[in-house]
Amino acid sequence: MVTQTTTDYRIKGETGEWEVVIGLEVHAQVTSNAKLFSGAATAFGAEPNTQVSLIDAAMPGMLPVPNRECIRQAVRTGMAIDAQINRWSRFDRKNYFYADLPQGYQISQLYHPLVGEGALTIDADEKAGIAEPKRIGIERIHVEQDAGKLMHDQHPSMSYVDLNRSGIALMEIVSRPDMRSPAEAGAYLSKLRSILRYVGSCDGNMDQGSMRADVNVSVRKPGSELGTRTETKNVNSVRFVMQAIEQEARRQVEVLESGGKIVQETRLFDPDKGETRSMRSKEDAHDYRYFPDPDLLPLELDEDFLTECRNSLPELPDAKRARYEGLGITPYNAAVLTAEVETARWFDALLGAGAKPVQASNWVAAELFGALNRLGRDITDSPVSPVQAAGLLALVADGTLSGSLSKQVFEIMLETGQDAAVIVEERGLKQTSDTGAIEAVIAEVLAKNPGQLEQYRGGKEALFGFFVGQTMKAMGGKANPAVVNDLLKKALAG
């Protein structure tokens, strides 16, 4: 069983509690129109082997040339996590043989990576068992080329090789083993994905394979030395990463408590069965016979390049969240609005169109998100633009629309694409504060409900809401609620 409080996460076995130690190696495909060392395209979904250059196919005599944009994006990513940027770095050859690796080696960086140590901070989430913000160390980011893809479902007895991914630029972002629960790992991966998307260095589409995680897990008795770790390869969703950690940790505890030993190995996660299973023994660095790539000169970054990278960074999630909170927006709403870069851009456009921050944040979190969820759309495909939303909120702020009327107008905007002001004018949905008209309706409501009136005046004050509702209903929701409340109090006291 698992015991978890707001301060720890433990697996309870027959011999007591076990601590889980987790590190992630995230492979993020660099946003670039061309591959790391060739001019071949990188678009997702192309027909097999249609985006392959002679370099990607390892034809004799073909020499790699580094793609400046790929290096730039990796440097910008390092800056976004406050990491050390190494002005001098080098490419190495990682030697192994596999059908989807035509060269017989992968060009990577082991000894001198482009980006050194950095960190990111995950937020507190008591529901998930994260009691307070926690800093997760990042050991390095190195740039490497991706392998191709084996296709096993094309023929009953043969596998095919698609080299479209061969040579695509990857950033391998290696964390320290600082995470202690599936929730912390999920929060780290989500935060990292958010930063990459803000920076624009990776689209973060895990379902398409452009971001995936190798999950390193070990268990130990609290306070003891680190145990032997396993690596579960290529997990492609935050939810699956969390599931893989829990299942692998449970498996290791069962092995150890039955008298066995954990083998350093590579495993895979089967989401259908909810389990990890062994693939092969885990190699050490010396097994790959790393050596400097003789076809590539070291990378040397000058100050002008670094300055350009630094100046190109956008406002990042934590800074944007702090800015929103400084505008009076609740921490919860600020977190929701900054979780995805598209949402933050939409909200910034809404503020830029004149919407008031607190009113706008509440409306987006409740009304807009609710409508988009119902329609099965995301915010980039919203039927209502930020400028149109600002127009709607302005009509609420100046008293033209009540809360209930604004909901009606918003639904019509979703259906027609019209501006709120046009809908209000054409359909006569303007809120009224005409005291004479409201008083007349109140008199009718009281006359029609003598029993409730007698109960209210006899002390059943909860019926006040009943009279408000009846009045608003009789006026088609167009009465100003504040005026209704004031006039009702006077009439009921009469």
Image (tube, helix red, strand yellow):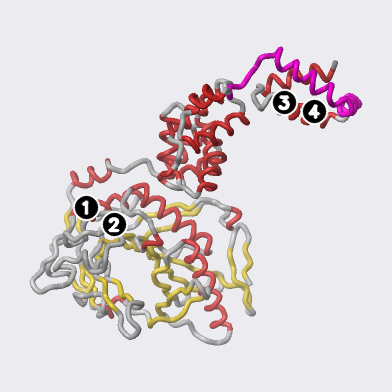
- Pick whichever, 320 or 336, lies toward us: 336
Q: Which residues are magenta?
A: 429-458
Separation of disc 1 and disc 2 at Cα? 9 Å
User: Helix or strand or loop: what does disc 4 sit on?
Assistant: helix
Q: Residue under label 2, please give it.
A: 30
- Mark 3 vs 4, N-terminal side: 4
Q: Is residue 174 something one can see in this rendering?
A: no
Please state which amino acid type lies under the numbered disc 3.
Ala
Magenta region includes residue 36? no
Query: Which mark is on residue 464?
Result: 4
Q: Residue furthest left?
A: 61
Q: Secondary structure at mark 2?
A: loop
Please identify the residue farthest to the front as the structure is shown.
426
Q: Which residue is mark 1?
A: 69
Q: CA distance from mark 4 to mark 1?
A: 66 Å
- The relative height of residue 250 versus residue 366 in the rendered view (above or below) is below
- Tag count: 4
- Name the quadrant containing residue 371: top right
What's the magenta bit mostly, secondary-structure-wise?
Answer: helix
- Residue matched to label 3: 474
Q: Nearer the viewer, mark 3 or mark 2?
A: 3
- Reply above or below: 193 against 275: above
Of badges 4 and 1, the one in the foreground is 4
Residue visible at 74% across and 30% down in the picture: 469
Position of 302 with respect to 200 (left or right) is: left
Of the residues under marks 3 and 2, which one precedes in the sequence?
2
What residue is shown at x 48% (from left), y 27% (from top)? 391
Q: Which residue is nearer to you in this view: 339 or 8? A: 339
